[in-house]
Image (tube, rainbow, N blue to C red):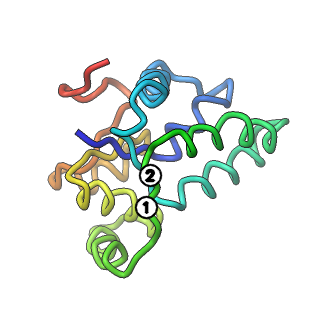
């Protein structure tokens, strides 16, 4: 299984009030098996923006915590016409353009988008490309 990491997962690694055990599980697996993870290129920009807004040392946390993960072996998907077309389907279902890119990437790689955005997950739940990890991990998640 390929796992698509949402920015909502990554910020929970660094924002004290947002830390969650399921986000930690994703981080541990990402460090050990980066090749089973992917993100759309916008992931880096989203995480950077949130860290700059919410963390007192946002730039340093991003440089020391996120950049090594991005360079550690997971695949980063740039925006392409093909991905935009797939994402448009999810926009039509009610997702934001950002969230639609995560869902489209999950569909493209036959993977699963891991997110803490319950509302986005509910909008496309029947598509089987997203999983809300706020309560539990997917049944096919192995540590």
In depth, the one of 60 and 10 nearer the eye is 60
Q: In this view, does 8 lie above or below 93?
A: above
x and y percentages locating residue 82 in the rendered image = 31, 77
Quadrant placement of the C terminus: top left
Q: In this view, does 30 lie above or below 78?
A: above
Q: Residue at x 43, y 21 (%)?
A: 25
Q: Which element carries disc 1, helix, strand or loop?
A: strand
Report the residue marked by disc 1: 77
Q: Is residue 3 left or right of residue 117?
A: left
In depth, the one of 78 and 12 nearer the eye is 78
In depth, the one of 110 and 100 nearer the eye is 110
x and y percentages locating residue 88 in the rendered image = 32, 76
Q: In this view, does 106 lie to the left or right of 75?
A: left
Q: Which residue is drawn at 78% across and 41% down?
A: 58
Q: Which element carries disc 2, helix, strand or loop?
A: strand
Q: Do the residues labelled 2 and 1 touch (CB within 8 Å)?
A: yes
Nearer-N-terminus badge (2/1): 2
């Amino acid at each position: 299984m390929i796992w698509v990491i949402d920015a909502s997962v990554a910020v929970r690694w660094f924002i004290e009030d947002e830390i969650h055990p399921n986000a930690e599980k994703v981080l541990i697996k990402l460090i050990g098996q980066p090749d089973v993870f992917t993100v759309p290129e916008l992931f880096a920009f989203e995480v950077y923006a949130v860290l700059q807004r919410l963390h007192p040392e946002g730039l340093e946390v991003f440089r020391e915590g996120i950049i090594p993960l991005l360079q550690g072996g997971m695949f980063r998907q740039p925006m392409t016409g093909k991905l935009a077309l797939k994402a448009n389907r999810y926009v039509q279902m009610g997702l934001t353009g950002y969230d639609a890119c995560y869902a489209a990437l999950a569909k493209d790689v036959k993977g699963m988008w891991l997110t803490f955005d319950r509302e986005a997950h509910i909008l496309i739940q029947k598509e089987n490309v997203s999983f809300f990890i706020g309560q539990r991990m997917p049944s096919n998640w192995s540590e």
